[in-house]
Amino acid sequence: MSDWDGERVLVTGGASFIGSHLVEDLVAAGANVRVADDFSSGERANLDGVHDRVDVVDGDLTEKAFADEVTRDIETVFHLAADHGGRGYISNYPANCATNMALDNIVYESAANNGVERITFASSACTYPTDIQQERRPLREDMVSFEERGGAYADEVYGWAKLMGERSLQAYHEQYDIDASIVRIFTAYGPRENETHAIIALMAKAYAQQDPYQIWGDGEQTRNFTYVKDITRALRLAAENITDATPVNAGIGRYVTINEVVDAIFDHLGWEPDEREYMTDKPVGVRHRAADTTRAENLLGWEPEYTVEDGLRRTLEWYTGARDRAYVRENLETLLHER
């Protein structure tokens, strides 16, 4: 199925950073979109471009009655709602992240009871074993296994919760014959993301002209920063092409150091601090992370369209246009640590 025209779609967490971009894409494709969000981190302003063409429902998806309400008369669910944040958030609030296990199962059960035809789950690269990410080793989907002893070793409670979200969805597919797909998202960034995530945090510090400029870790840790529109395209393609809950990666295969990102931001802004302060006591997660996208290429015909350089430029242009420099400077610490 690739024609979204008239499709009745629910996007949970649809006012979030990634969710709002997905909602825009689905509306543009002709879908009838309902958004369910509790606005704990999502913002109504994220949907300004489509607010008159979507049904936005405010509520808590951990409440069964609300989940039942929003999944009624829906054909496809994109399940993005989660309690999450950047590395600092998932390290400091593990119990919050653990609530995602309840959230996922309530959404799946309500969808099954209401006859939803397919569910696409936004999973995470945090599902991958942490011990294999100390060196530059591209992550393949089969590096996570539910079939063999020791086949799972996820990244903090957030990663374990996402992994259980995957396994639960596979169980609902097996028991209820719901079409299901899973996209493991790798370090998404782009317009509308908040300052608790790495790319926007680095942009905020530079925009506020923080000096000494603070970098968590030694700056040589790598991520495969993936532009948001590549992520949302992978979610749509997964819903269209996968029915058996096979997970696919959505990320780039390039290892990008934090120092490289910082240099690009400074170049774009035409500003550089006198000093860089490397904060090696801060949580930074795994050492290296990049995706093997062979499966996504084979099953979805998907590969990233945006280079890191193009994505950073687009995101920085959005950030400097959307944020007042004086406000960012005055509220920098709050912005960096609140969802």
Image: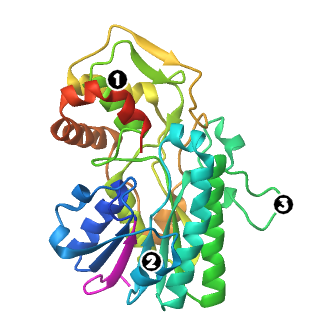
Q: Is residue 3 left or right of residue 65?
A: left
Q: Residue at x 18, y 75 (%)?
A: 53
Can residue 301 be seen? no
How much space separates mark 2 and mark 3, taking CA atoms? 38 Å
Mark 2 vs mark 3: in front? 2
Please state the horizontal and vertical placement of residue 249, each as a whole percent of the image.
Answer: 52, 59
| SS for dot 2 | helix
Depth check, front residue: 271 or 77: 77
Q: Where is the N terminus found, in terms of image quarters?
A: bottom left
Residue interval drawn in magenta: 1-12
Q: Residue 263: which disc?
A: 1
Depth check, front residue: 172 or 265: 172
Q: Is residue 290 left or right of residue 237?
A: right
Q: Residue 149: which disc?
A: 3
Residue 286 appears in which quarter of the rendering?
top right
Please state the horizontal and vertical placement of residue 137, each as a whole percent of the image.
Answer: 62, 42
- The residue type indicated by label 2 comes to Phe
Would residue 120 be counted in the magenta stretch?
no
Q: Is residue 335 left or right of residue 313?
A: right
- The residue type indicated by label 3 comes to Arg
How much space separates mark 1 and mark 3, taking CA atoms? 43 Å
Q: Is residue 212 above or below residue 51?
A: above
Can residue 13 be seen? yes
N-terminal of the pair, mark 1 or mark 3, is: 3
- The residue type indicated by label 1 comes to Asp
Q: Is residue 135 left or right of residue 40?
A: right
